[in-house]
Each structure stands twice: as structure tokens, then as C-alpha cells.
Image (cartoon, rainbow, N blue to C red):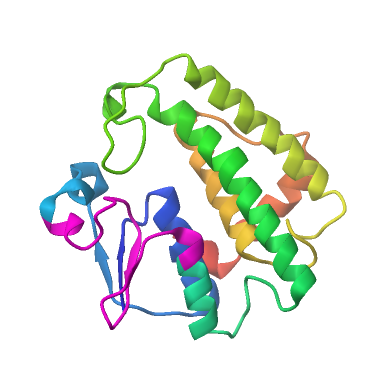
Amino acid sequence: MKLYSYPPAPSPQRVHFFMKEKGIDLPVEVIDMMAAEQLGDAYKAINPRGTVPALVLDDGTVISDVVAIYRYLEMIFPDTPLLGADAKEQALISEWDHRIEMEFLTAIAEALRNHGRSFKGRAFPGDLDIEQIPELVARGRLRAEAFFNILDQQLASNVYVAGEKFSAADITAFVGIRFCAWIKLAVPEEMVNLQRWLLAVSQRPSMAT
């Protein structure tokens, strides 16, 4: 197997942390997203979506969705399960990981990609050229800030996002909070539950970049 990645970006970073937490070591080729290498012919011959990450299996199969990569790696490397050990854990982790991605990460991306020259004509990832809508910046920030509250409330009665065990949902939330720095948002100090969790997760050896 071979992973095509760009670890500074949020989606590749999720897979990067997932692999570190499970102790998975795979060959990695860095695709320079700052130079738009993901949109070049060479990479698109591997992943026509023009998105990163992409996991290429030994038989040539390409998996280019973060959660799909999670699921494949979890099956191949079952030690240190991060997607749940029973039906209830799997359901809760899947629910929270999906919510964080759709309600939090997409909100941050909305605020980021609709602002500034760096994403001009590139308001969405991949091969589709879409113009920015500056009015979406404020909406994205409001959505991201609102999700801080959701996470803080969830962590009031849970050690980790989806329960008592560290999971893929925590990785996605942690990456999302780091991603917030790109739009100059930080977790408010008064959100003590989220602050407690953030400190604990940031001290995990696997979460160091």
C-alpha cells in the first residue's frame, strides 16, 4: 500500500493521526497542495477527484475518502480499535465523526475558502472551479463557534467525544480545532469541558506533528 498525503491539510492530517495512533507505518508520497500538485495530470492519473489523501492498495484500488481509509485500515490493522469494539461504540463513533465533519469541518472550510486570494475560483476542493461567496465567511465562522458549544456540552458527561474511549471522532474534532486557527478562531476559555479534553488529546504522543 501507498498513501498520497499532505499532512498540514486537515483531511490528510486525520489519516496521519489515525495511523500514528494505531502504529501503522506505510510508504507516503507528499502531494504539495500549496503548489496545486493535486490538480496536476500526474496525480489525477492516480486520483481523478484531485483530492488528498488517497490510499492505493497493492492491487491498484484507490480509496480517496478519509472515513473509507479509516475503515480499510481498521480492518487490516485491528489492534487499537478507533472505530468501536462493539455495535454501540461503532454507532456512536460513526455518528459523532460524521457530525464533526459535516457541521464543524465544513463550516471552517466555508469561512476559509470564501475569503482571500489563495482560494479565488477554488471555493471547493477537487477539480471543480467555483467562485467565492464572501457572505459565507461570517456564516461559516458562526457555525464553527456554535459547534464549540456542542462539543463542550457533549464532553460534560463523556471523557472523549463518543464516550469513555479515544476514537476517530476525537481525531476529527482535534483536527477541526487546529483547523480553526486558519480562520483565527480559538476555543473560549470558559468552555472548561472542551479545554480539558483539548489538553488531554494534545498530550497524546500520536497527536504530535
- Asked if one can make out residue 177 in the rendered structure from this viewpoint, the answer is no
Left or right: residue 92 compared with residue 32: right
Residue 134 lies, in percent from the top left, at 42, 15
Q: Is residue 55 rendered magenta in the image?
A: yes
Residue 98 lies, in percent from the top left, at 62, 52
- Asked if one can make out residue 9 in the rendered structure from this viewpoint, the answer is yes
Q: Which is more toward the observer, 135 or 118?
A: 135
Left or right: residue 9 compared with residue 204: left
Image quadrant holding the C terminus, namely bottom left
Q: Is residue 47 above or below residue 186?
A: below
**Residue drawn at (47%, 72%) of the image:** 19
**Residue drawn at (29%, 31%) of the image:** 122
User: What is the span of residues highlighted in magenta in the rendered image?
Assistant: 42-68
Outermost residue, right side: 157
Outermost residue, top side: 135
Residue 83 lies, in percent from the top left, at 63, 70
Image quadrant holding the N terminus, namely bottom left
Q: Is residue 185 above or below residue 69?
A: above
Q: Which is more toward the observer, 102 or 22?
A: 102
